[in-house]
Image (tube, coloured by chain):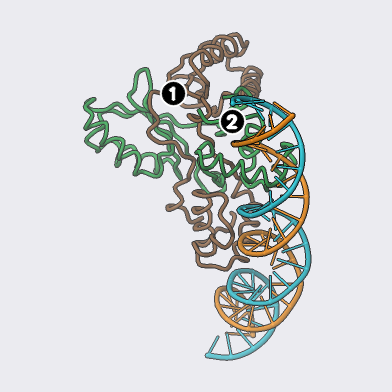
Chain colours: A brown, B green, C orange, D cyan
DNA sequence: TTTGCGACGCAAGGTGCATGCAAATTCGGA
DNA sequence: TCCGAATTTGCATGCACCTTGCGTCGCAAA
């Protein structure tokens, strides 16, 4: 597959923690020169091992007070219907994540909203009325114990 | 609360998309000078509206082929037990997200693993044997329709 | 109107980045 | 074991970028 050695892994781990690390800081962290870090980083970006860099914003500070998981059952399992639902999900910014899962429901969505009215709007005015959707059940997040997107790289040597 | 004006929102939106934007690029995007972008960005970081920057790594490219949602029921609801579970979750790198929810289960975890054996290990050798845990039910992700951490800022003027 | 304060753009000095280059290292075949 | 080719590395350099000081502008209160 894509060549990723121990240096790359250290760099990836460091960049997962701080995406604005200087090549020099990276160099100090992994034990290479800055120029090498620059080259390797460009390669990793080129190969899409690093798919992007993002600022992490505080949902609390910005007034997003409600997070919800929404289990969705489709009206039919036709490919056409699935595609319509997919497009819907892509379009709605409040939906951060969407997965199809084994188990009871067809899909699970994670949504971020300003308040409970926002959730109500999403469920009752966006999801429920959509032709592809049959049934919706939402659970509100009471407490966030952990929330990261870091991969457990310690176990990874490709 | 924290003062965030239209310029700030534009900057935040831009930095959500690309966390390595230059102050000058930011300036072009929002219609300010680079120096002002620098100052405002520092302020937003200071105030923790921007909580950090992270490289986004491709789980596929790095061989993490299994994502699972794990519903956990605690043995008892004592504060002591909850704290033990909290610590466990924090320690296990494979668990990316953990929430307590309204509804059936006490907690939902999102875990990233190399393969099904990894999931099995996590469930049977880490979660199940832990004294705080009574019951575990896991669902495997079949398809990822959407996966982002962007906040829907269009609705946000604090 | 005047005064004070905050936000602005500009300019300059310092810092970081990317590429050329030569030395060092690795690897396979004889 | 030895040698040569290919890859990887560190260093140097020219260029872009970042940050801070400074003077200006606009607005709000007196």
Give me the disc on residue A67: none
Q: Secondary structure at mark 2?
A: loop
Q: Are marks 1 and 2 on the same chain?
A: no
Q: Secondary structure at mark 1?
A: loop
Residue A28 vs B135, above or below: the answer is: below
Pointer 2 residue: B4
Residue D12, located in which quarter of the rendered image? bottom right
Q: Residue at x 42, y 23 (%)?
A: A141
Q: Residue at x 49, y 31 (%)?
A: B141
Residue D27, located in which quarter of the rendered image? top right
Q: Nearer the viewer, residue A1 or A90?
A: A90
Q: Residue at x 35, y 41 (%)?
A: B90
Query: Quick check: marks 1 and 2 in contact, CB under 8 Å?
Result: no
Residue D13 vs D15, above or below: the answer is: below
Where does residue B76 sit, x and y in percent of width and height?
22, 26
Q: Chain of mark 1?
A: A
Q: Please state the total of marks drawn on the protein image.
A: 2
Pointer 1 residue: A103
Q: Nearer the viewer, residue A106 or A112?
A: A112
Q: Nearer the viewer, residue A26 or A8?
A: A26
């Amino acid at each position: 597959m894509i060549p990723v050695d121990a240096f790359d892994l250290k760099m990836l781990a460091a960049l997962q923690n701080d995406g604005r690390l200087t090549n020099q800081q990276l160099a100090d962290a992994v034990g290479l020169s800055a120029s090498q870090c620059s080259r390797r980083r460009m390669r990793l970006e080129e190969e899409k091992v690093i798919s992007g860099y993002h600022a992490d914003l505080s949902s609390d500070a910005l007034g997003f007070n409600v997070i919800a998981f929404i289990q969705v059952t489709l009206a039919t399992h036709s490919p056409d219907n699935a595609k319509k639902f997919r497009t819907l999900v892509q379009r709605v910014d409040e939906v951060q994540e969407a997965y199809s899962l084994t188990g009871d429901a067809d899909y699970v969505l994670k949504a971020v909203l300003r308040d409970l009215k926002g959730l109500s709007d999403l469920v009752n005015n966006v999801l429920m009325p959509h032709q592809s959707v049959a049934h919706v059940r939402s659970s509100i997040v009471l407490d966030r114990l952990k929330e990261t997107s870091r991969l457990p790289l310690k176990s990874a040597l490709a």
